[in-house]
Amino acid sequence: MAIEHARAHAVQKPWGVADLRPWTRANHGGSRLIGEIWYERSGSGSLEPSLLLKLLFTSQPLSIQVHPDDAYAQSIGLACGKTEAWYILSAVPGARIALGLKERLASRQLREAVNDGSIAGLVAWQTVLPGDVVFVPAGTIHAIGAGLVIAEIQQRSDATFRMFDFDRKRDLHIVNAVAVADPGPADASLKARRLTDERTLLVSNPHFVLERIELAPGSTNRLEAERETWLLIVSGSARAGRLDVTTGDAVFAQSDGVDMHAGPEGMTSLVAYTGVGGPVRHLLRSPAHASVADAAALPDGQVPTTSLLHTQAAPLHGLAGATP
């Protein structure tokens, strides 16, 4: 059982930024370009989680790259592959991401495009807006453009094979990249799905589930963290158990329940948890639902719990979203 205020670890990148406000209150110094914040468990001696929650800050395009799946990663001695999803927190006008190629290539053509740099003109760039969701399965060729702040949830792996690096002179990984890449267009047709008034399912796959939760001002709910669960505050504030959290804070919880008391402006958060079994049916309970559940446990009562999961369509502007 665990409920922890996650520790934010800043990572320097050549494409990063100097000003991370409002996502962190830490002063990282104007001369340092921070490209990522990794959220880590705060408890010493804690078991390593299977998921990694990040924030990404871009002043330049990231490399065009691809990640392996579990089977390929393990064949070269890595623990697991890397499937990920992005939630666009902020975007300058015209900010873009690349997902897949404009047209399908043969393996030989892909290798030639990586070797001569023409891959840069073959990826499919798309404009994004705040609130967009992008699902990046392992094997998908992708890149992130400049002017973005992105929340990313991923398998806990740093297995990245670069195909093009915009003249930053870092190593490319041509053999591995060509071996794992799907050299064609990516499927960006998936939609988000409203589960309850508070919950929107964004992405669901065997590795993780990503939801957006919106709590009304002053409301109280209980987050049931049956599995490894990460919560990132993207706006507003709340008291999570004994922790006061606000924009940019993250909480780790597992095998425990967290009482969430939203602040006077409400709270919007992203919640990610391990994906085996799909979305957690009773992830969020109101006090009324909790009382019904408690009554169900009484010897006399046998009162059935009320389901919090129902399918009500709620389109969300985005590139990719939930697979129920």
Image (spheres, rainbow, N blue to C red):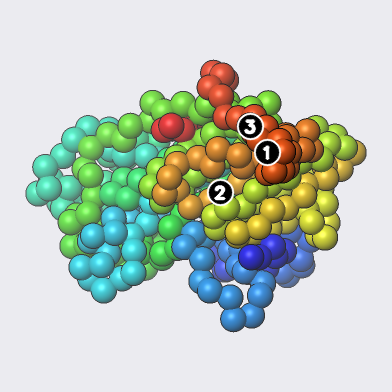
Cβ–Cβ under 8 Å for marks 3 and 1: yes
Give the quadrant of the N terminus.
Answer: bottom right
Of circles 3 and 2, the one toward us is: 3
Q: Which residue is mark 1?
A: 296
Q: Nearer the viewer, residue 34 or 291?
A: 291
Q: What residue is shown at x 51% (from left), y 60% (from top)?
A: 52
Instruction: Please tell me how crowded label 2 is: few (under 14), some (14-19), or many (20+) other residues with Cα within 10 Å.
Output: many
Q: What residue is shown at x 51% (from left), y 28% (from top)?
A: 192
Q: Position of residue 94 (x, y in %)?
A: 54, 33
Q: Residue 130 lies in what quarter of the image? A: top right
Q: What residue is shown at x 66% (from left), y 75% (from top)?
A: 43
**In the drawing, does residue 46 fall left or right of residue 191?**
right
Residue 7's place in the image compared with 257, above or below, is: below
Q: Which mark is residue 215?
A: none
Q: Position of residue 193 (x, y in %)?
A: 52, 26
Q: Is residue 251 shown to the viewer in this render?
A: yes
Residue 159's place in the image compared with 21, above or below, is: below
Instruction: Please tell me how crowded label 3 is: few (under 14), some (14-19), or many (20+) other residues with Cα within 10 Å.
Output: few
Circle 1: element type: helix
Q: Residue 294 lies in what quarter of the image? A: top right
Q: Which residue is mark 3?
A: 304
Q: Which residue is mark 2?
A: 272
Cα distance, mark 3 to mark 1?
A: 6 Å
Residue type highlighted by circle 3: Pro
Circle 3: element type: loop
Cα distance, mark 1 to mark 2?
A: 28 Å
